[in-house]
Amino acid sequence: MGNKKLLQLTASYEDNLIEALKDPEEAQAYLEAALQEYEDSGQTGGLLLALRDVAKAQGSVGELARRAGINREHLYRVLASKSQPRLDKLLAILSGLGFRVRLELQHA
């Protein structure tokens, strides 16, 4: 497969993903999967990517920063995996995206 064709397919995948994430239920399922992956692996990269994707679907990272009450430059650094988000910032980001965190009992 040529590079041009690969770029076309990749671009349309991202466009389709962002379009799908405009649906709040799709965004929720996507973020839940990313949180599960983080819980399983301890790696934050996938979760931060998911947060960036949902922010993009809802407008922009800059708009998310405004809604979350977080400095835009700091939010860009966090979502680019250049710094680990503190719990208060993660909760603010999720709130800015229209979500909240709930606890559930683990089953043995």
Image (spheres, rainbow, N blue to C red):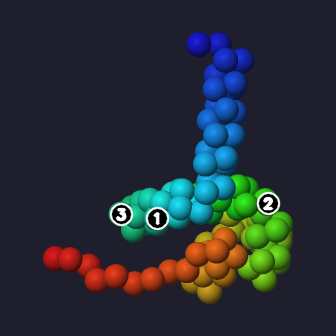
Of labels 3 and 2, earlier in sequence is 3
* Amino acid bearing label 1: Glu
The residue identified by callout 3 is: 40
In this rendering, position of residue 2 left or right of residue 32: right
Measure how far apart labels 1 and 2 are at the Cα level: 20 Å
Q: Tell me where residue 89 sits by quadrant.
A: bottom right
The residue identified by callout 1 is: 32
Give SS at disc 2: loop
- State whether residue 100 appears in this view: yes
Q: Position of residue 4 (x, y in %)?
A: 71, 18
72 or 15: which is nearer to us? 15
The residue identified by callout 2 is: 60
Q: Residue at the location (65% across, 59% down)?
A: 54
Q: Position of residue 90 (x, y in %)?
A: 61, 77
Of labels 1 and 2, earlier in sequence is 1
Quadrant, the C terminus: bottom left
Could you classify mark 2 by the number of other residues whose Cα lies within 10 Å: few (under 14), some (14-19), or many (20 or more)? few
Of labels 3 and 1, earlier in sequence is 1
Measure how far apart labels 3 and 2 are at the Cα level: 29 Å
51 lies above or below 71: above
Marks 3, 1: nearer the viewer: 1
Q: Residue at the location (39% across, 68% down)?
A: 39
Could you classify mark 3 by the number of other residues whose Cα lies within 10 Å: few (under 14), some (14-19), or many (20 or more)? few
14 or 90: which is nearer to us? 14
In this rendering, position of residue 103 left or right of residue 97: left
5 lies above or below 69: above
Q: Position of residue 55 (x, y in %)?
A: 70, 61
In this rendering, position of residue 86 left or right of residue 67: left
